[in-house]
Image (cartoon, rainbow, N blue to C red):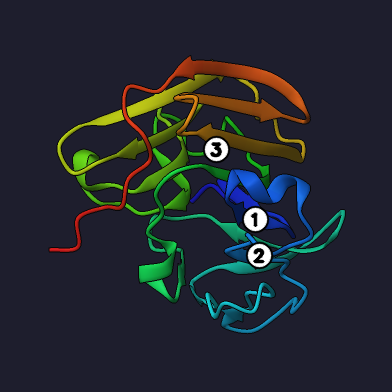
Amino acid sequence: MNKSTLTLLTALLLVPLAALHAAEPGLIAHWNFDEGRGHVARDVSGHGHDATLKNVEWVPSPRGHALRFDSKEDLARYGGLDSMNLSGDATLAVWVKTDPAAAPNTHRLIFGDSGAGVQRNLHLSLDSYNRLSFEWADGRSNDSLLAPASLLNGLWKHVAVVADSRAMQVTMYVDGTEVARKAMSLPISKAPTT
């Protein structure tokens, strides 16, 4: 089995767009992985989105600790699902390290839900062509933003997606550089719960 399919680093943040310039009032979840071991990654935002870990490996990272996911059975399931079902503006930021040669031609979820396309809330992944993909839906249709292939090259990368549902624009950044942008055909909407 190939190791190092996907490693998530110390700061996975999910914030509404308005919180980018505020202290932390709009922060919804933040996992810094400071635990370094165990079966739970604590959400330090105070909102109770602690993640239960299954089959992941704690590994060192430039910022402390990270989680390595090396098979489809590996999972970090966060709690408080209702408050993680977002609508409107959102920013998702994560540190990621992956080896494009490991498990080629596979779809790897980085963050989000794994429901059917139109039932997804939001979802950041590495697709089978090694492109970063941000997807969202409204229960009737879905949309996605694709970045060019080969942006993740085995080094730690900071990936951020800013979805501005008022301006109907979504932008993806890797290490602070814009890599993809498009007009949104639909705003981020809460996923159907039934």
126 relative position to 94: left or right: left
Q: Residues within 10 Å of mark 1 (few under 14, many from 20)?
A: some
**Residue 108 placement, left or right of 42:** left
Front tag of 3 and 2: 2
- Residue 60 position, x and y percent, is 80, 62
Q: Secondary structure at mark 2?
A: strand
Q: Please, what secondary structure does the residue beneath circle 1 have?
A: strand
Task: Estimate the spatial distance between the alpha carbons at disc 3 and disc 2, rounded to whole Å.
Answer: 28 Å
Q: Earlier in the sequence, mark 3 or mark 1?
A: 1
Where the C terminus falls, by quadrant? bottom left
Residue that mark 3 sits on:
102
Is disc 2 surrounded by few (<14), some (14 to 19) or many (20+) residues within 10 Å?
Answer: many
Residue named by callout 2: 30
Height in image: 122 above or below 41?
Answer: above
Q: CA distance from mark 3 to mark 1?
A: 26 Å
Give the residue type at disc 2: His
Report the residue at 65% width, 37% height from top: 160
Q: Earlier in the sequence, mark 2 or mark 1?
A: 1
Q: Which residue is mark 1?
A: 13
How far across and down, in percent of the image, does residue 136 sit?
35, 38
